Image (spheres, grey):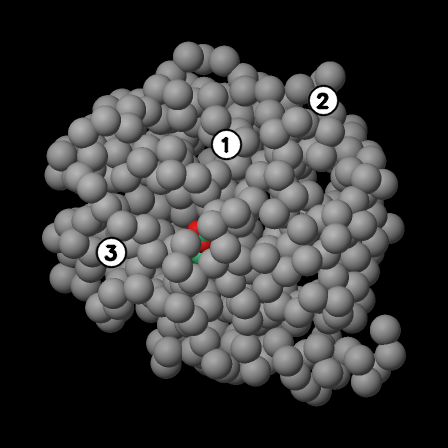
Amino acid sequence: MTPNERTRLARQASEILIDNDRGDYTVPTKGLYPFQWNWDSCLSALGLAALDEDRAWREMETLFAHQWPDGMVPHIIFHQADEGYFPGPEIWQTGRPVPTSGITQPPVAGFAARRIFERSQDRTAYAPRVRSLIEKIDRWHAFLYDARDPQGEGLVAVIHPWESGRDNTIDWDEPFRHVPREGITPYRRRDVEHADPAHRPTKAQYDRYIWLVEHFRGHAWNNAVLHNASPFRVVDPAFNAILIRSCADLSELAGMLGAEDIAEANRSRAEKGLAALESLWSEADGQYLCLDRTTGRLVRSLSVGGLLGVLAAIPQERARAIGDRIAALMTRCAYPVPSHDPSDPLFDAKRYWRGPVWLIVNYLLADGLKAAGLSEQAASLRAGSLALIEKSGFAEYYDPLTGEPCGGDRFTWTAAMVLEFLRGADGELGRI
Ligand code: GLC
């Protein structure tokens, strides 16, 4: 890529971030997702930091201003009314001063905060704000291990597919059988009015998403009981690896800020989680698998969720095996990394999390591979990701076989990840 091409891509990415900026938070994209989403915001903050560090911290502060008293950080904050989205606040009915959803999302905040602070232009000035933010992130981690790992096994469960961030992955097909469809209030989907229905989850899946929301609402969103009350309880290796990595990063960040208690608590959470993650490893598949906690069985579904284990400091031989799996997947696809193994008959190249490429996933995988010393593989993910953007622009996700852009357009976190990938080996982006 020539310096001019780099500059052009960086400018386009910045324009998208500015366009989707609503002052104190960004929307993932216009139309389809008109509110603030949890992990979108934290990953987008990495991109915002390249434009304006103050604005990046504000993005995360806004999210954490809506943390629940029990420590949960919701997956959506409904800052303003918008008719174009379903299910809106009137369905969730969580009773929060500013309406929010009632479930969470992958906890990338600790990971993002450490990275932004390490690159900070003025650590002394930002330290008091970051000190206050890390207390909230720590409370979120404590919530997750309390409420979603009630037996203290070291691994947390997601109780709704939306919590994983991979809404309709093939991983959920089997565990979703325990979730009924009957008795839900009739509803009208809005997502299929903004995006091609063939690229989105099916009606059968949507019915179950809504059944779970109504079920949790029936329990008054009481997180002390929701885990055991949910017919969907899945231990997702990606969610856990993200949490383990965020605990480890929060521990480092807390150490830099002199918060020894937070540093220690998160170091021990990360150690316990890392040891427990071993139980999800499948030697035959060379990756981690999901565990259905309602049956106690591993789900043999070869999705990118099991590859994202590499984001945590897993044993070297596991990281190498995951690197080999990614290399094998890349020989079957024009663009890395498919969200599901194309040799599975259920693979669907255009349907959301059942095959398409997501740039945030490539970024997290590349980061984990690099940390494990697999720099060449990380570099090839970076090159493949930028080639895809050059060909198809800043979409929500892409067909891995053709590179066709799918879902929403001008996507915030895609743009943020491009800015991350454009940084040189020294971590510098240069002038945009
Ligand atoms: C979809 C994705 C989820 C993301 C959200 C907003 O629901 O599956 O991961 O956070 O859109 O972009």
SS class, disc 2: loop
SS class, disc 1: loop
Spatial CA distance of label 3 from label 2 is 39 Å
Circle 2 sits on which residue?
285
Marks 1 and 3, the one that precedes in the sequence: 3
Spatial CA distance of label 1 from label 2 is 16 Å
Q: Quadrant of the image for the N terminus?
A: bottom right
Disc 3 residue: CB within 8 Å of ligand 1? no
Q: Quadrant of the image for the C terminus?
A: bottom right
Identify the residue at horizontal 73%, vertical 25% (top origin).
286
The spot of residue 356 in percent (x, y) is 63, 47
Identify the residue at horizontal 45%, vertical 13% (top origin).
296
Identify the residue at horizontal 87%, vertical 79% (top origin).
2
Disc 2 residue: CB within 8 Å of ligand 1? no
Residue type, label 1: Asp
Residue 86 visible here: yes
Circle 1 sits on which residue?
236
Residue type, label 2: Asp
Circle 3 sits on which residue?
88
Which label sits on residue 345? none
Which is nearer the eye, 319 or 193? 193
Left or right of 5 on screen, residue 240 = left
Q: Choose top left, top right, bottom left or bottom right for residue 222.
A: top left
Identify the residue at horizontal 65%, vertical 83% (top origin).
11
Residue type, label 3: Gly
Give neighbour class at mark 1: few <14, some 14-19, many 20+ (Cα, 10 Å). many
Disc 1 residue: CB within 8 Å of ligand 1? no
Left or right of 372 on screen, residue 260 = left
Placement of 151 over or under 314, stated as above or below? above
SS class, disc 3: loop
Frontmost of labels 3 and 2 is: 3
